[in-house]
Image (cartoon, coloured by chain):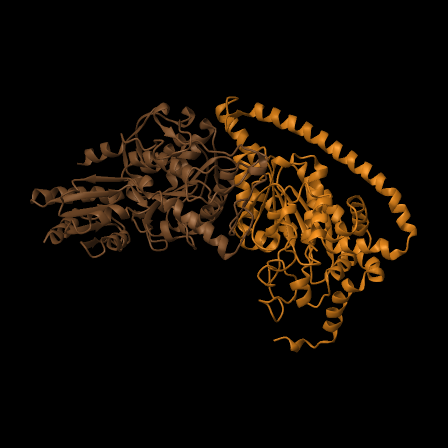
Chain colours: A orange, B brown
Amino acid sequence: MSTDIEKFKAGSPMSSVLRMDRMPHIWCPGCGIGSEVNSFAEAVKRSGVDPKKIVVVSGIGCTGRVAGYVNFDSIHATHGRAVAVATGVKLANPDLTVVVFSGEGDLAGIGGNHLIHAARRNMDLIVICNNNFTYGMTGGQVTPTTPGTASASTTPYGNYEYPFSLPLLMDACGATYIARWTSMHSRNVTQSIEEALARKGFSFIEIISPCPTLYLRRNRLGDGVDQLQNYQDNSILKHGADTRETAIDYQGKIVVGKFVERNKPTYLEASDKCAVKLIGDDYQLYGKTLPEREAEEKAEKERTAARRAAALAEEAAQESAAAAPKAAAKKAPAKKAAAPKKAAAKAPAKKAAAKAPAKKAAAPKKTAAKAPAKKAAAKTAPKAVKKPAAKPAAKAKAAPKKTRK
Amino acid sequence: MKTEQRKASAPVDVCSSERFPGVSITTADPKGVDAGAHFMDGDHAIAEGGLAAGCRFFAGYPITPSTETAERFAERAPEVGAMFIQMEDEIASIAALIGGAWGGQKVMTVTCGPGFSLMTENIGLACMTETPMVIANVQRAGPSTGSPTLTAQQDMMQAKWGPHGDNLMIALSPDSPQECFDLTVEAFNLSEYYRVPVIILTDETVGHMHEKVVVPPADQIKVLPRNNYSGPVEECRPYKFNSKGGNPMVRAGDGYNFHITGLVHNEKGYPAANAAQGKVVVTHLMEKINSNADKIIRLDEDQVDGADVVVVSYGITSRIAVKAIQDARKEGMKVGSLRMITIWPFCEKRIRELAGKVKAFVVPEINYGQMVLEVERCAGGRSKVISVNHCGGAVHDPEVILDAIRKANK
């Protein structure tokens, strides 16, 4: 067991961006957070942003633990305050790229005030919001986004509150980049994070994600993979969608895509402008004039572009190297090829990476994200994995509701 | 005696290598120092003290009677090259300070009771993550919204016991606008050294009182610059649980990939929430203050040795007490004055020394009796302790304090 973990740690393609000395992580099998972190890590690698200059801030909760697993400067703040802490980091050192990675209860519930004001100020932050409709860490309570009549431990007879549509909220507050995906859309999530890393201003990326342990089980919606199937069946891709039409009903349609991308001065740009108007070109922030800072930023941008080009070239080389064994695998019996697919879609790279060598693991992951996960998995997944997924679902349908107290 | 008090606190070298061993001490960055004699109120002096100490990041939220500090900082920020942001509330303000401190800046905010209450949870996070910061609490009369424009000293215990769990902060209490300046500089030095929030517990009267404030030239203001770790990556530890001050900070962006959390953690900053590690962390948080109390505590004493009655006071009340003490001395009583400049850690050792030697301690304060509890605890029944309390909204009538001294002397 421990040797498996050590092998995984050594061979993981993400070992440079994740804290391998903290693995295994705490997230449940079937949870979406792991694959989101994987997407984030991949986006960082592809973006070319200097990893030294990235700071990740999380709040409290399951997603709040993200800060502890990423190999960057990271702050695990108090419940709801991640955005405010991140604001402090960014303003204290504008050279840093500051990412908030937290859950919807943390960001839009207890931390809603900070979220709306950071968006209003166009604070130069990237906010990644894992929205699983539940407070996972505390045992499955209703959140500000729990849709429709879903059951939660604090709405045991069904939810009767109106949920937030986070893209609409963020749009109204002035966020300059808004996207929503589900945790099935790994590649799109990666792409959105890459876009956010390359731009200035307040970027908000919502990722709808399954919580199999609490939300799905309580609502008898099967396992994580069943929910991924639901995302596959019910996601409607609509770039530039009117954010007023992005509400999510209980197990209803989920509008996904990049909804908003607009440019306006960030908080720092606006405050610089004001100060320069007052003081002139002598104005310095933390001992540096604006032209000095702009020159540094430009140089860093060039270095980032070079690093990005190198990362993409390396990726292409790896892909072509992986193409040969991949073609061979196609001919092999389906079981072998599909098993890592299922694992990749369901859980973070852990299982896939432990079984397959590093290079292979990266390739099947992508196909898993694209292909309907259930179909591939249902046929071929090993019994041990499939059973717990199917059993509660079957039971749930048969069990009368009143068995619950 | 009033002028003697001023003199007593000014020329002492409060930033010596004996007091702050093992770290470098420099002089202030002239950019933040508005040297000269000013006529200014305590709130403004706090902002000037912060700028002089090298604070370049202020996040705050307006609240009477502290707002003037934020206004002053906002006005001065562009010329000094500092960042000022008015956050959406006090919770955000203190959270931004935590981010700002790990982002590499010296940070401060200002508030009063209601805002201080809102900040409390994240003051706990700052204690736990050992984040240096200065928070000025310009106290107003409570409870709750209370009397926003009127004075009080009712948050004394909150500055010690506010955040849940066991942790200690340092608190200082200025009695004048000049001390608002001096003690803010000192607060930053203590905060940087012990990596702990330092609270300036002033009050509405001092905050809004205009007096002469002398800001010395930059080369006469001694400060502790931020002590950032710069060694090898693999040896980088954001924490050292050694019950000492002087441990270095780690700055975001320097490539050390630090992690900090409010969870019980190990020296790497990784979560390690178990009883054994809890003991290690809590012991360090408590003992880095307790075991250095002698170095931290500053008192302003006048004729305490040989006194029959000692008036223990702080902040604006100590200035009211001067009149009562002078009158009592005229009546032939042997009265000493012990003014606490440092509130927390409490001057336990000194009170214990005096207990049994003096007939009584008289403790006037603008609350229902808070610091008097500490005096009682340390007096241990060996001397009488007389509380001269006040429900807030005004300062004492000196006559009331004088009556208490007379009673104490019997």
Asked where in the image residue A175 lies, by quadrant, the reply is: top right
Residue B317 lies, in percent from the top left, at 23, 45
Point 50% across, 52% down: residue: B277
Q: Nearer the viewer, residue A197 or A74?
A: A74
In this rendering, the answer to whether B69 lies above or below A148 is above
| A29 in relation to B23, above or below | below
Of residue B374 and residue B398, the one placed in the foreground of this image is B374
Q: Residue furthest front?
A: A3
Quarter placement of the C terminus of chain A = bottom right
Q: Give the number of callouts.
A: 0
Q: Residue furthest right?
A: A331
B149 relative to A377 in the view: left or right = left
In the rendering, at what x and y percent does residue A67 appear? 60, 47
Left or right for A128, reference A92: right
Residue A218 position within the rendered picture, expressed as x and y whole percent measured from the top left: 66, 67
Q: Quadrant of the N terminus of chain A?
A: bottom right
Q: Residue at x 24, y 55 (%)?
A: B376
The spot of residue A350 in percent (x, y) is 72, 51
Q: Residue at x 72, y 60 (%)?
A: A224
